[in-house]
Image (cartoon, rainbow, N blue to C red):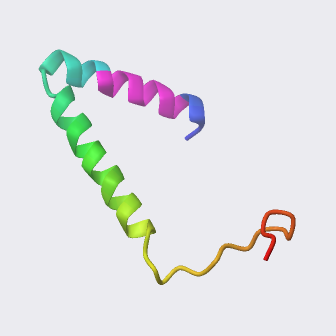
Amino acid sequence: MGLRDLIQLAAFLALLLASSGHLSEVASTVRKAQLQVIKEGQSTKWGRPFLPDTVYSD
């Protein structure tokens, strides 16, 4: 499935949800899921990312 197909699917689902009155519920659920992913990504167990020496100047 390409990016164009995903965009068309997302637009179709948004229109379907908006017409049925459930768009705000889905948006709220997606927002909660995004916050959970951000919170899980902030774990102190993660090490320092590997970046070129030009970014870090220790």
Determine whether 20 is above or below 5 in the image. above
Tell which residue pokes out farthest to the top in this image: 19
- Residue occupying the point 81% across, 71% down: 57
Q: Position of residue 38 (x, y in %)?
A: 40, 59
Tell me the quarter of the image containing the C terminus: bottom right
Residue 5 percent location from the top left of the image: 52, 31
Residue 11 in magenta stretch:
yes
Front residue of 27 and 46: 46
**Residue farthest along the front direction in this orientation:** 58
| Residue 36 horizontal side relative to residue 25, left or right | right
Q: Residue at x 16, y 35 (%)?
A: 25
Q: Is residue 28 left or right of residue 38?
A: left
* Residue that protrudes farthest toward the right in the picture: 54
Q: Which residues are magenta?
A: 5-14
Inspect the magenta stretch and tell me whether residue 12 lies in it.
yes
**Residue 50 placement (x, y as % from top left):** 73, 74
Left/right placement of residue 40 relative to residue 28 reads right
Residue ID at (59%, 37%): 2
Is 41 above or below relative to 2?
below
Specify the quadrant that holds the N terminus: top right
Eyeballing the image, is 45 above or below 12? below
Where is residue 41 shown, x and y percent of the image? 44, 67
Q: Nearer the viewer, residue 38 or 14?
A: 38
Total tally of numbered discs in the picture: 0
